[in-house]
Amino acid sequence: MPPTLASLVHHSALKLTVRAGADRLDVPVRWAHVSELADPVPYMEGGELLLITALKLDAEDPEAMRRYVKRLVKAGVVGLGFAIGVNYDEIPAALVEAAEEEGLPLLEVPRRTPFLAISKAVSAAIAADQYRAVTAGFAAQRELTKQALNAGPEGLLSALAAQVDGWAALYDASGAVVATAPEWAGRRAARLTTDVERLRERPAPASAVVGGPETEDRVELHSIGTSRRPRAALAVGTAAPLGTAERYAVHSAIALLTLTTERSRSLHAAEQRIGAAVLRMLLAGQPDHARAVAGDLYGGLLDAPFRMIVAESGSASAARAHAEGHARVRPAASAGGGAPAATGAGGDPLAALAEVVEAAAARSGEAVLVVPDGERLVVLAADGGAAVTACTEHAAALEAARAQAVREQRAADEDELVVGLSAPAGPIAAAAGYKQAEQALSVARRRGRVLVEHEQLASGSVLPLLADDAVRAFADGLLRALYEHDATGRGDLVASLRAWLSRHGQWDAAAADLGVHRHTLRYRMRRVEEILGRSLDDPDVRMELWLALKATATEQP
Protein backbone atom coordinates (compact mmCIF):
# COMPACT_ATOMS: atom_id res chain seq x y z
CA MET A 1 0.00 0.00 0.00
CA PRO A 2 1.28 3.54 -0.75
CA PRO A 3 1.72 5.93 2.22
CA THR A 4 -1.39 7.65 3.51
CA LEU A 5 -1.96 10.62 5.78
CA ALA A 6 -2.96 8.15 8.49
CA SER A 7 0.35 6.29 8.22
CA LEU A 8 2.23 9.59 8.52
CA VAL A 9 0.18 10.62 11.57
CA HIS A 10 0.97 7.26 13.18
CA HIS A 11 4.69 7.60 12.38
CA SER A 12 6.24 7.85 15.85
CA ALA A 13 9.18 9.99 14.77
CA LEU A 14 7.12 12.73 13.09
CA LYS A 15 4.80 13.65 15.98
CA LEU A 16 2.09 15.03 13.69
CA THR A 17 -1.26 16.19 15.08
CA VAL A 18 -4.55 16.30 13.16
CA ARG A 19 -6.31 19.68 13.37
CA ALA A 20 -8.93 19.22 10.62
CA GLY A 21 -10.27 16.52 8.24
CA ALA A 22 -9.70 13.60 10.61
CA ASP A 23 -12.21 11.50 8.61
CA ARG A 24 -10.12 11.73 5.41
CA LEU A 25 -6.75 10.45 6.49
CA ASP A 26 -6.93 7.22 4.45
CA VAL A 27 -6.15 9.03 1.20
CA PRO A 28 -2.85 8.02 -0.48
CA VAL A 29 0.01 10.53 -0.58
CA ARG A 30 1.94 10.70 -3.87
CA TRP A 31 4.58 13.13 -2.58
CA ALA A 32 5.40 15.74 0.09
CA HIS A 33 6.09 19.21 -1.29
CA VAL A 34 7.24 22.41 0.41
CA SER A 35 6.00 25.74 -0.97
CA GLU A 36 5.62 29.17 0.59
CA LEU A 37 3.97 30.66 -2.49
CA ALA A 38 0.68 32.45 -2.01
CA ASP A 39 -0.64 30.33 -4.91
CA PRO A 40 1.28 27.05 -5.34
CA VAL A 41 -1.49 25.47 -7.44
CA PRO A 42 0.31 25.86 -10.83
CA TYR A 43 3.08 23.60 -9.49
CA MET A 44 0.80 20.87 -8.11
CA GLU A 45 -0.04 17.59 -9.91
CA GLY A 46 -2.51 16.22 -7.40
CA GLY A 47 -2.05 13.80 -4.51
CA GLU A 48 0.54 15.93 -2.67
CA LEU A 49 0.91 16.72 1.01
CA LEU A 50 1.73 20.45 0.97
CA LEU A 51 4.05 21.68 3.74
CA ILE A 52 4.02 25.40 4.70
CA THR A 53 5.08 27.86 7.41
CA ALA A 54 2.71 30.59 6.09
CA LEU A 55 5.67 32.88 5.41
CA LYS A 56 3.77 34.77 2.70
CA LEU A 57 0.20 34.03 3.78
CA ASP A 58 -2.17 36.11 5.85
CA ALA A 59 -3.21 33.03 7.71
CA GLU A 60 -5.45 34.97 10.12
CA ASP A 61 -7.67 36.38 7.33
CA PRO A 62 -10.74 34.08 7.10
CA GLU A 63 -11.65 35.09 3.52
CA ALA A 64 -8.06 34.74 2.26
CA MET A 65 -7.78 31.31 3.88
CA ARG A 66 -11.08 30.14 2.36
CA ARG A 67 -9.84 31.10 -1.13
CA TYR A 68 -6.44 29.49 -0.47
CA VAL A 69 -7.89 26.18 0.76
CA LYS A 70 -10.45 26.02 -2.05
CA ARG A 71 -7.67 26.34 -4.64
CA LEU A 72 -5.67 23.58 -2.96
CA VAL A 73 -8.63 21.19 -2.87
CA LYS A 74 -9.47 21.91 -6.49
CA ALA A 75 -5.85 21.16 -7.46
CA GLY A 76 -6.03 17.73 -5.80
CA VAL A 77 -3.85 18.45 -2.77
CA VAL A 78 -4.67 15.70 -0.25
CA GLY A 79 -3.38 17.36 2.91
CA LEU A 80 -1.79 20.48 4.38
CA GLY A 81 1.05 20.37 6.91
CA PHE A 82 1.51 23.58 8.99
CA ALA A 83 4.75 24.10 10.91
CA ILE A 84 4.18 25.87 14.23
CA GLY A 85 6.81 27.82 16.09
CA VAL A 86 8.20 29.45 12.93
CA ASN A 87 5.91 32.26 11.83
CA TYR A 88 2.94 31.29 14.03
CA ASP A 89 2.98 29.71 17.48
CA GLU A 90 -0.16 27.76 16.59
CA ILE A 91 -2.27 27.23 13.51
CA PRO A 92 -4.54 30.28 13.03
CA ALA A 93 -8.23 29.61 13.59
CA ALA A 94 -9.08 31.05 10.15
CA LEU A 95 -7.04 28.31 8.43
CA VAL A 96 -8.46 25.57 10.68
CA GLU A 97 -12.05 26.68 9.93
CA ALA A 98 -11.37 26.91 6.18
CA ALA A 99 -9.86 23.39 6.17
CA GLU A 100 -12.83 22.02 8.11
CA GLU A 101 -15.29 23.61 5.66
CA GLU A 102 -13.56 22.08 2.62
CA GLY A 103 -12.77 18.75 4.28
CA LEU A 104 -9.04 19.19 3.74
CA PRO A 105 -6.91 17.30 6.31
CA LEU A 106 -4.77 19.80 8.26
CA LEU A 107 -1.73 18.44 10.12
CA GLU A 108 0.20 20.34 12.78
CA VAL A 109 3.96 19.89 12.40
CA PRO A 110 5.93 20.52 15.61
CA ARG A 111 9.01 22.77 15.56
CA ARG A 112 11.36 19.85 16.17
CA THR A 113 10.12 17.95 13.08
CA PRO A 114 11.79 19.29 9.94
CA PHE A 115 9.95 19.15 6.65
CA LEU A 116 12.82 17.06 5.32
CA ALA A 117 11.91 14.29 7.77
CA ILE A 118 8.36 14.20 6.42
CA SER A 119 9.61 14.14 2.82
CA LYS A 120 12.00 11.28 3.67
CA ALA A 121 9.21 9.35 5.37
CA VAL A 122 6.94 9.70 2.33
CA SER A 123 9.78 8.80 -0.06
CA ALA A 124 10.74 5.74 1.98
CA ALA A 125 7.13 4.54 2.15
CA ILE A 126 6.72 4.99 -1.61
CA ALA A 127 9.96 3.09 -2.28
CA ALA A 128 8.87 0.29 0.06
CA ASP A 129 5.51 0.07 -1.69
CA GLN A 130 7.19 -0.09 -5.08
CA TYR A 131 9.56 -2.78 -3.84
CA ARG A 132 6.62 -4.81 -2.55
CA ALA A 133 4.89 -4.37 -5.92
CA VAL A 134 7.97 -5.49 -7.85
CA THR A 135 8.48 -8.44 -5.53
CA ALA A 136 4.82 -9.40 -5.87
CA GLY A 137 5.11 -8.96 -9.63
CA PHE A 138 8.04 -11.35 -9.83
CA ALA A 139 6.18 -13.85 -7.67
CA ALA A 140 3.15 -13.52 -9.94
CA GLN A 141 5.36 -14.02 -12.98
CA ARG A 142 6.76 -17.24 -11.51
CA GLU A 143 3.28 -18.51 -10.69
CA LEU A 144 1.90 -17.61 -14.13
CA THR A 145 4.85 -19.29 -15.83
CA LYS A 146 4.37 -22.42 -13.73
CA GLN A 147 0.67 -22.58 -14.57
CA ALA A 148 1.29 -21.92 -18.27
CA LEU A 149 3.78 -24.82 -18.40
CA ASN A 150 1.66 -27.23 -16.35
CA ALA A 151 -1.90 -26.36 -17.30
CA GLY A 152 -1.64 -24.30 -20.50
CA PRO A 153 -3.58 -21.08 -21.16
CA GLU A 154 -6.47 -22.20 -18.93
CA GLY A 155 -4.18 -22.52 -15.92
CA LEU A 156 -2.52 -19.21 -16.73
CA LEU A 157 -5.92 -17.46 -16.83
CA SER A 158 -6.89 -18.94 -13.46
CA ALA A 159 -3.66 -17.71 -11.89
CA LEU A 160 -4.06 -14.27 -13.47
CA ALA A 161 -7.65 -13.92 -12.24
CA ALA A 162 -6.47 -14.72 -8.70
CA GLN A 163 -3.61 -12.20 -8.95
CA VAL A 164 -5.82 -9.30 -10.03
CA ASP A 165 -8.80 -10.35 -7.86
CA GLY A 166 -11.06 -10.36 -10.90
CA TRP A 167 -11.58 -12.43 -14.04
CA ALA A 168 -9.68 -13.10 -17.27
CA ALA A 169 -10.65 -14.36 -20.73
CA LEU A 170 -8.77 -15.42 -23.85
CA TYR A 171 -10.13 -14.85 -27.37
CA ASP A 172 -8.94 -16.53 -30.57
CA ALA A 173 -8.08 -14.86 -33.88
CA SER A 174 -11.75 -14.71 -34.90
CA GLY A 175 -12.79 -12.95 -31.69
CA ALA A 176 -14.49 -15.99 -30.14
CA VAL A 177 -14.01 -16.80 -26.44
CA VAL A 178 -11.56 -19.68 -25.98
CA ALA A 179 -11.27 -19.86 -22.19
CA THR A 180 -12.29 -17.89 -19.09
CA ALA A 181 -11.44 -17.90 -15.41
CA PRO A 182 -13.44 -18.22 -13.25
CA GLU A 183 -16.09 -20.11 -15.24
CA TRP A 184 -18.82 -17.58 -14.38
CA ALA A 185 -16.96 -14.96 -16.46
CA GLY A 186 -17.91 -16.71 -19.73
CA ARG A 187 -21.07 -14.67 -20.28
CA ARG A 188 -19.34 -11.44 -19.34
CA ALA A 189 -16.52 -12.16 -21.79
CA ALA A 190 -18.96 -13.06 -24.58
CA ARG A 191 -20.54 -9.59 -24.35
CA LEU A 192 -17.19 -8.03 -25.28
CA THR A 193 -16.89 -9.74 -28.69
CA THR A 194 -17.60 -6.51 -30.57
CA ASP A 195 -14.90 -4.65 -28.62
CA VAL A 196 -12.43 -7.46 -29.31
CA GLU A 197 -13.21 -7.31 -33.03
CA ARG A 198 -12.52 -3.57 -33.02
CA LEU A 199 -9.21 -4.19 -31.22
CA ARG A 200 -8.23 -6.79 -33.86
CA GLU A 201 -8.55 -4.17 -36.60
CA ARG A 202 -5.73 -2.16 -34.98
CA PRO A 203 -2.07 -3.07 -35.53
CA ALA A 204 -0.55 -5.06 -32.68
CA PRO A 205 0.33 -4.39 -29.94
CA ALA A 206 -2.94 -2.69 -29.06
CA SER A 207 -4.98 -2.23 -25.90
CA ALA A 208 -8.26 -0.66 -24.84
CA VAL A 209 -10.25 -0.06 -21.67
CA VAL A 210 -14.00 -0.66 -21.72
CA GLY A 211 -16.69 -0.52 -19.10
CA GLY A 212 -19.53 -2.91 -18.51
CA PRO A 213 -23.08 -2.22 -19.69
CA GLU A 214 -23.86 -0.86 -16.23
CA THR A 215 -20.27 -0.07 -15.24
CA GLU A 216 -20.23 -3.43 -13.40
CA ASP A 217 -16.47 -3.67 -13.81
CA ARG A 218 -13.46 -2.22 -15.57
CA VAL A 219 -12.10 -4.35 -18.43
CA GLU A 220 -8.73 -4.05 -20.14
CA LEU A 221 -8.33 -5.63 -23.58
CA HIS A 222 -4.86 -6.49 -24.92
CA SER A 223 -3.88 -7.93 -28.30
CA ILE A 224 -1.64 -11.02 -28.28
CA GLY A 225 1.06 -11.71 -30.87
CA THR A 226 4.01 -10.06 -32.57
CA SER A 227 2.69 -9.89 -36.15
CA ARG A 228 0.63 -7.02 -37.50
CA ARG A 229 -2.53 -9.09 -37.18
CA PRO A 230 -3.18 -10.14 -33.55
CA ARG A 231 -3.28 -13.90 -33.03
CA ALA A 232 -5.48 -13.61 -29.94
CA ALA A 233 -6.74 -11.16 -27.32
CA LEU A 234 -6.73 -11.08 -23.52
CA ALA A 235 -9.46 -9.48 -21.40
CA VAL A 236 -8.92 -8.67 -17.71
CA GLY A 237 -11.86 -7.51 -15.61
CA THR A 238 -11.47 -5.88 -12.19
CA ALA A 239 -13.56 -3.76 -9.85
CA ALA A 240 -10.94 -0.98 -9.80
CA PRO A 241 -7.93 0.18 -11.85
CA LEU A 242 -4.96 -2.15 -11.67
CA GLY A 243 -2.21 -1.48 -9.16
CA THR A 244 1.50 -1.85 -9.84
CA ALA A 245 1.68 -5.52 -8.82
CA GLU A 246 -1.44 -6.38 -10.81
CA ARG A 247 0.00 -4.53 -13.82
CA TYR A 248 3.15 -6.66 -13.60
CA ALA A 249 0.97 -9.78 -13.58
CA VAL A 250 -1.00 -8.69 -16.65
CA HIS A 251 2.15 -7.86 -18.61
CA SER A 252 3.65 -11.23 -17.67
CA ALA A 253 0.49 -12.98 -18.87
CA ILE A 254 0.64 -11.10 -22.19
CA ALA A 255 4.27 -12.12 -22.68
CA LEU A 256 3.57 -15.77 -21.88
CA LEU A 257 0.51 -15.91 -24.12
CA THR A 258 2.50 -14.26 -26.91
CA LEU A 259 5.16 -16.96 -26.60
CA THR A 260 2.44 -19.59 -26.66
CA THR A 261 0.74 -18.18 -29.76
CA GLU A 262 4.03 -17.68 -31.61
CA ARG A 263 5.01 -21.26 -30.81
CA SER A 264 1.54 -22.32 -31.97
CA ARG A 265 2.07 -20.39 -35.19
CA SER A 266 5.31 -22.27 -35.86
CA LEU A 267 3.56 -25.57 -35.16
CA HIS A 268 0.69 -24.47 -37.36
CA ALA A 269 3.09 -23.82 -40.24
CA ALA A 270 4.56 -27.29 -39.79
CA GLU A 271 1.10 -28.84 -39.65
CA GLN A 272 0.18 -26.93 -42.79
CA ARG A 273 3.15 -28.44 -44.64
CA ILE A 274 2.03 -31.91 -43.57
CA GLY A 275 -1.51 -31.04 -44.67
CA ALA A 276 -0.25 -29.99 -48.09
CA ALA A 277 1.53 -33.34 -48.47
CA VAL A 278 -1.62 -35.21 -47.41
CA LEU A 279 -3.69 -33.25 -49.93
CA ARG A 280 -1.25 -33.96 -52.78
CA MET A 281 -1.39 -37.68 -52.02
CA LEU A 282 -5.18 -37.69 -51.91
CA LEU A 283 -5.42 -35.90 -55.26
CA ALA A 284 -2.85 -38.32 -56.72
CA GLY A 285 -5.08 -41.28 -55.79
CA GLN A 286 -2.91 -42.50 -52.91
CA PRO A 287 -5.31 -42.54 -49.92
CA ASP A 288 -3.33 -45.16 -48.00
CA HIS A 289 -0.13 -43.13 -48.18
CA ALA A 290 -2.10 -39.99 -47.28
CA ARG A 291 -3.54 -41.71 -44.21
CA ALA A 292 -0.08 -42.86 -43.14
CA VAL A 293 1.34 -39.33 -43.41
CA ALA A 294 -1.72 -37.76 -41.72
CA GLY A 295 -1.30 -39.93 -38.63
CA ASP A 296 -3.19 -38.66 -35.60
CA LEU A 297 -3.07 -35.09 -36.88
CA TYR A 298 -5.53 -35.48 -39.77
CA GLY A 299 -6.26 -39.20 -39.61
CA GLY A 300 -9.69 -38.74 -38.05
CA LEU A 301 -10.65 -36.43 -40.89
CA LEU A 302 -10.12 -39.22 -43.41
CA ASP A 303 -12.30 -41.73 -41.53
CA ALA A 304 -15.60 -40.02 -42.42
CA PRO A 305 -17.09 -38.17 -45.41
CA PHE A 306 -15.55 -34.77 -45.96
CA ARG A 307 -16.06 -31.72 -48.18
CA MET A 308 -13.55 -30.01 -50.44
CA ILE A 309 -13.58 -26.21 -50.38
CA VAL A 310 -11.70 -24.27 -53.06
CA ALA A 311 -11.62 -20.48 -52.66
CA GLU A 312 -10.13 -17.57 -54.58
CA SER A 313 -9.99 -13.85 -54.01
CA GLY A 314 -12.10 -11.75 -56.34
CA SER A 315 -9.08 -10.32 -58.17
CA ALA A 316 -7.55 -13.75 -58.83
CA SER A 317 -10.94 -15.11 -59.87
CA ALA A 318 -11.49 -12.24 -62.30
CA ALA A 319 -8.07 -12.80 -63.86
CA ARG A 320 -8.78 -16.51 -64.23
CA ALA A 321 -12.19 -15.83 -65.75
CA HIS A 322 -10.60 -13.45 -68.26
CA ALA A 323 -7.99 -16.05 -69.18
CA GLU A 324 -10.74 -18.64 -69.72
CA GLY A 325 -12.74 -16.24 -71.85
CA HIS A 326 -15.64 -15.92 -69.42
CA ALA A 327 -17.23 -12.73 -68.20
CA ARG A 328 -17.77 -12.49 -64.47
CA VAL A 329 -21.22 -11.24 -63.51
CA ARG A 330 -21.03 -8.53 -60.84
CA PRO A 331 -23.90 -6.78 -59.07
CA ALA A 332 -24.38 -3.21 -60.19
CA ALA A 333 -22.98 -0.51 -57.95
CA SER A 334 -22.51 3.19 -58.29
CA ALA A 335 -19.13 4.73 -58.83
CA GLY A 336 -19.56 6.70 -55.66
CA GLY A 337 -17.61 6.06 -52.48
CA GLY A 338 -18.55 4.03 -49.50
CA ALA A 339 -16.86 1.44 -47.42
CA PRO A 340 -17.05 -2.09 -48.75
CA ALA A 341 -17.81 -5.00 -46.49
CA ALA A 342 -14.80 -5.87 -44.37
CA THR A 343 -13.00 -9.03 -45.27
CA GLY A 344 -10.79 -9.11 -42.19
CA ALA A 345 -7.27 -10.44 -41.88
CA GLY A 346 -5.76 -7.21 -43.14
CA GLY A 347 -8.08 -7.12 -46.18
CA ASP A 348 -7.09 -10.63 -47.38
CA PRO A 349 -10.34 -12.59 -47.98
CA LEU A 350 -8.55 -15.95 -48.12
CA ALA A 351 -6.81 -15.35 -44.77
CA ALA A 352 -10.15 -14.28 -43.30
CA LEU A 353 -11.81 -17.50 -44.52
CA ALA A 354 -8.92 -19.57 -43.12
CA GLU A 355 -9.34 -17.86 -39.74
CA VAL A 356 -13.07 -18.54 -39.75
CA VAL A 357 -12.89 -22.26 -40.55
CA GLU A 358 -9.88 -22.94 -38.29
CA ALA A 359 -11.46 -21.12 -35.34
CA ALA A 360 -14.75 -23.00 -35.83
CA ALA A 361 -12.93 -26.32 -36.02
CA ALA A 362 -10.87 -25.53 -32.92
CA ARG A 363 -13.97 -24.62 -30.90
CA SER A 364 -15.72 -27.86 -31.88
CA GLY A 365 -12.60 -30.02 -31.49
CA GLU A 366 -12.69 -31.31 -35.07
CA ALA A 367 -9.78 -31.66 -37.47
CA VAL A 368 -9.57 -29.44 -40.55
CA LEU A 369 -6.97 -29.32 -43.32
CA VAL A 370 -6.28 -25.80 -44.63
CA VAL A 371 -3.73 -25.46 -47.43
CA PRO A 372 -2.85 -22.18 -49.20
CA ASP A 373 -2.22 -23.05 -52.85
CA GLY A 374 -0.87 -20.02 -54.70
CA GLU A 375 -3.80 -17.68 -55.28
CA ARG A 376 -6.19 -20.29 -53.91
CA LEU A 377 -7.11 -21.71 -50.54
CA VAL A 378 -8.00 -25.41 -50.35
CA VAL A 379 -9.86 -26.72 -47.31
CA LEU A 380 -10.75 -30.30 -46.44
CA ALA A 381 -13.35 -30.34 -43.66
CA ALA A 382 -15.70 -32.89 -42.12
CA ASP A 383 -19.09 -33.09 -43.82
CA GLY A 384 -21.72 -31.53 -41.57
CA GLY A 385 -19.05 -30.20 -39.23
CA ALA A 386 -18.52 -26.78 -37.71
CA ALA A 387 -15.89 -25.73 -40.28
CA VAL A 388 -18.21 -26.26 -43.28
CA THR A 389 -21.05 -24.51 -41.45
CA ALA A 390 -18.77 -21.57 -40.60
CA CYS A 391 -17.68 -21.34 -44.25
CA THR A 392 -21.26 -21.18 -45.55
CA GLU A 393 -22.28 -18.68 -42.87
CA HIS A 394 -19.25 -16.50 -43.68
CA ALA A 395 -20.19 -16.57 -47.37
CA ALA A 396 -23.82 -15.72 -46.55
CA ALA A 397 -22.67 -12.74 -44.48
CA LEU A 398 -20.54 -11.49 -47.39
CA GLU A 399 -23.50 -11.93 -49.78
CA ALA A 400 -25.70 -9.93 -47.41
CA ALA A 401 -23.07 -7.18 -47.12
CA ARG A 402 -22.79 -7.02 -50.91
CA ALA A 403 -26.58 -6.76 -51.29
CA GLN A 404 -26.63 -3.99 -48.70
CA ALA A 405 -23.91 -2.13 -50.62
CA VAL A 406 -25.99 -2.37 -53.81
CA ARG A 407 -29.11 -1.07 -52.04
CA GLU A 408 -27.12 1.84 -50.62
CA GLN A 409 -25.44 2.43 -54.01
CA ARG A 410 -21.99 1.91 -52.57
CA ALA A 411 -19.05 0.49 -54.46
CA ALA A 412 -18.60 -3.26 -54.01
CA ASP A 413 -15.36 -4.79 -52.74
CA GLU A 414 -13.14 -5.65 -55.72
CA ASP A 415 -11.16 -8.23 -53.73
CA GLU A 416 -14.12 -10.22 -52.46
CA LEU A 417 -14.30 -13.98 -51.95
CA VAL A 418 -15.35 -16.70 -54.43
CA VAL A 419 -15.86 -20.22 -53.07
CA GLY A 420 -16.73 -23.63 -54.52
CA LEU A 421 -17.94 -26.44 -52.24
CA SER A 422 -17.93 -30.11 -53.26
CA ALA A 423 -20.41 -32.82 -52.41
CA PRO A 424 -19.45 -35.21 -49.57
CA ALA A 425 -16.59 -37.50 -50.58
CA GLY A 426 -14.13 -39.99 -49.10
CA PRO A 427 -10.36 -40.44 -49.45
CA ILE A 428 -10.75 -42.60 -52.59
CA ALA A 429 -12.88 -39.93 -54.29
CA ALA A 430 -10.82 -36.92 -53.13
CA ALA A 431 -9.76 -36.01 -56.69
CA ALA A 432 -13.40 -36.08 -57.82
CA GLY A 433 -14.36 -33.89 -54.86
CA TYR A 434 -11.65 -31.39 -55.75
CA LYS A 435 -12.93 -31.31 -59.34
CA GLN A 436 -16.47 -30.72 -58.07
CA ALA A 437 -15.27 -27.83 -55.91
CA GLU A 438 -13.45 -26.34 -58.91
CA GLN A 439 -16.59 -26.64 -61.05
CA ALA A 440 -18.69 -24.99 -58.35
CA LEU A 441 -16.04 -22.26 -58.06
CA SER A 442 -16.20 -21.65 -61.81
CA VAL A 443 -19.99 -21.30 -61.68
CA ALA A 444 -19.76 -18.96 -58.67
CA ARG A 445 -17.23 -16.87 -60.60
CA ARG A 446 -19.50 -16.57 -63.65
CA ARG A 447 -22.66 -15.87 -61.64
CA GLY A 448 -20.98 -13.30 -59.36
CA ARG A 449 -21.81 -15.39 -56.28
CA VAL A 450 -19.68 -15.75 -53.16
CA LEU A 451 -20.32 -19.48 -52.75
CA VAL A 452 -21.85 -22.22 -54.89
CA GLU A 453 -22.23 -25.86 -53.79
CA HIS A 454 -21.75 -28.60 -56.35
CA GLU A 455 -24.97 -30.26 -55.18
CA GLN A 456 -26.84 -27.13 -56.26
CA LEU A 457 -25.58 -27.62 -59.82
CA ALA A 458 -26.76 -31.23 -59.94
CA SER A 459 -30.22 -30.43 -58.55
CA GLY A 460 -30.79 -27.21 -60.48
CA SER A 461 -31.30 -26.29 -64.12
CA VAL A 462 -28.62 -26.02 -66.79
CA LEU A 463 -30.13 -22.80 -68.07
CA PRO A 464 -28.47 -20.46 -65.51
CA LEU A 465 -25.15 -21.71 -66.86
CA LEU A 466 -25.98 -19.96 -70.13
CA ALA A 467 -25.67 -16.55 -68.44
CA ASP A 468 -22.25 -16.09 -69.99
CA ASP A 469 -21.10 -13.60 -72.62
CA ALA A 470 -19.29 -16.30 -74.59
CA VAL A 471 -22.46 -18.43 -74.79
CA ARG A 472 -24.55 -15.43 -75.75
CA ALA A 473 -22.07 -14.46 -78.43
CA PHE A 474 -22.28 -17.98 -79.89
CA ALA A 475 -26.10 -17.90 -79.79
CA ASP A 476 -26.22 -14.47 -81.36
CA GLY A 477 -23.96 -15.58 -84.19
CA LEU A 478 -25.97 -18.75 -84.78
CA LEU A 479 -29.36 -17.02 -84.89
CA ARG A 480 -28.36 -13.65 -86.36
CA ALA A 481 -29.31 -14.62 -89.94
CA LEU A 482 -32.79 -15.69 -88.81
CA TYR A 483 -33.32 -12.48 -86.88
CA GLU A 484 -32.22 -10.44 -89.89
CA HIS A 485 -34.62 -12.40 -92.13
CA ASP A 486 -37.54 -11.76 -89.76
CA ALA A 487 -36.65 -8.06 -89.54
CA THR A 488 -37.46 -7.68 -93.28
CA GLY A 489 -41.04 -8.80 -92.65
CA ARG A 490 -40.73 -11.90 -94.85
CA GLY A 491 -41.76 -14.36 -92.16
CA ASP A 492 -41.42 -15.28 -88.50
CA LEU A 493 -38.74 -17.94 -88.64
CA VAL A 494 -37.41 -17.52 -85.06
CA ALA A 495 -40.83 -17.94 -83.42
CA SER A 496 -41.62 -20.85 -85.75
CA LEU A 497 -38.34 -22.58 -84.90
CA ARG A 498 -38.96 -22.11 -81.18
CA ALA A 499 -42.49 -23.52 -81.40
CA TRP A 500 -41.36 -26.49 -83.53
CA LEU A 501 -38.50 -27.38 -81.18
CA SER A 502 -40.66 -26.99 -78.06
CA ARG A 503 -43.15 -29.49 -79.62
CA HIS A 504 -40.34 -31.96 -80.38
CA GLY A 505 -40.90 -31.62 -84.13
CA GLN A 506 -44.64 -32.35 -84.03
CA TRP A 507 -45.98 -30.41 -87.00
CA ASP A 508 -49.68 -30.23 -86.08
CA ALA A 509 -49.12 -29.19 -82.46
CA ALA A 510 -46.50 -26.57 -83.35
CA ALA A 511 -48.64 -25.17 -86.20
CA ALA A 512 -51.61 -24.91 -83.83
CA ASP A 513 -49.47 -22.97 -81.35
CA LEU A 514 -48.51 -20.55 -84.13
CA GLY A 515 -51.99 -20.37 -85.67
CA VAL A 516 -50.74 -21.39 -89.14
CA HIS A 517 -51.23 -24.39 -91.43
CA ARG A 518 -48.75 -27.24 -91.00
CA HIS A 519 -47.61 -26.82 -94.64
CA THR A 520 -46.71 -23.21 -93.85
CA LEU A 521 -44.66 -24.40 -90.90
CA ARG A 522 -42.92 -27.03 -93.06
CA TYR A 523 -41.99 -24.30 -95.55
CA ARG A 524 -40.58 -22.13 -92.78
CA MET A 525 -38.45 -24.95 -91.36
CA ARG A 526 -37.01 -25.58 -94.87
CA ARG A 527 -36.13 -21.86 -95.03
CA VAL A 528 -34.42 -22.17 -91.62
CA GLU A 529 -32.30 -25.04 -92.96
CA GLU A 530 -31.46 -23.09 -96.14
CA ILE A 531 -30.47 -19.91 -94.26
CA LEU A 532 -28.44 -21.69 -91.57
CA GLY A 533 -27.00 -24.34 -93.86
CA ARG A 534 -27.80 -27.02 -91.29
CA SER A 535 -30.16 -29.96 -91.17
CA LEU A 536 -32.84 -30.04 -88.51
CA ASP A 537 -32.76 -33.82 -88.65
CA ASP A 538 -29.44 -33.68 -86.77
CA PRO A 539 -30.14 -33.91 -82.99
CA ASP A 540 -26.97 -31.94 -82.21
CA VAL A 541 -28.19 -29.09 -84.41
CA ARG A 542 -31.58 -29.10 -82.72
CA MET A 543 -29.90 -29.05 -79.28
CA GLU A 544 -27.64 -26.12 -80.22
CA LEU A 545 -30.54 -24.15 -81.68
CA TRP A 546 -32.70 -24.76 -78.62
CA LEU A 547 -29.93 -23.64 -76.23
CA ALA A 548 -29.24 -20.62 -78.43
CA LEU A 549 -32.91 -19.64 -78.27
CA LYS A 550 -32.84 -20.00 -74.48
CA ALA A 551 -29.64 -17.97 -74.17
CA THR A 552 -31.12 -15.11 -76.24
CA ALA A 553 -34.63 -15.32 -74.79
CA THR A 554 -34.29 -11.87 -73.20
CA GLU A 555 -32.18 -10.36 -76.02
CA GLN A 556 -33.61 -8.05 -78.63
CA PRO A 557 -32.97 -8.95 -82.29
Image: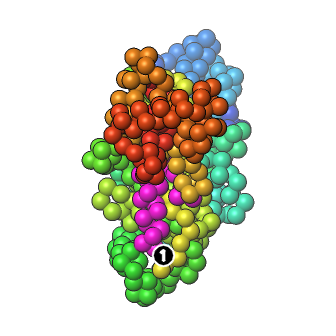
Q: Residue at x 69, y 22 (%)?
A: 101
Q: Nearer the viewer, residue 176 or 96?
A: 176
Report the front residue among 447 and 66.
447
Residue type of the residue flagged with mark 1? Ala
The residue that mark 1 highlights is: 429
Q: Position of residue 334 (x, y in %)?
A: 43, 22
Query: Residue at coordinates 72% horizontally, 38% vertically from top-left?
Result: 214
Please indicate, yes or no, whether residue 521 appears anywhere in the rendered image: yes
Direction from residue 260 to residue 84 in the image, left or right:
right
- Image height check: is 444 above or below 53? below
Q: Position of residue 118 (x, y in %)?
A: 48, 44
**In this picture, which residue range is highlighted in magenta?**
430-455
Residue depicted at 57% across the width and 45% down the height: 504
Tell me residue 186's x, y (percent). 68, 58
- Considering the whole magenta stretch, tell me its main secondary structure: helix
Q: Quadrant of the image for the N terminus? A: bottom right
Q: Which residue does the image show at 42% across and 64% down from the upper left? A: 435
Could you tell me residue 192's position as x and y percent? Answer: 61, 47
Nearer to the camera, 248 or 396: 396
Give the residue at the far front of this rendering.
519
Kindly indicate the quadrant of the structure image that contains residue 480.
top left
Left or right, residue 530 beside residue 24? left
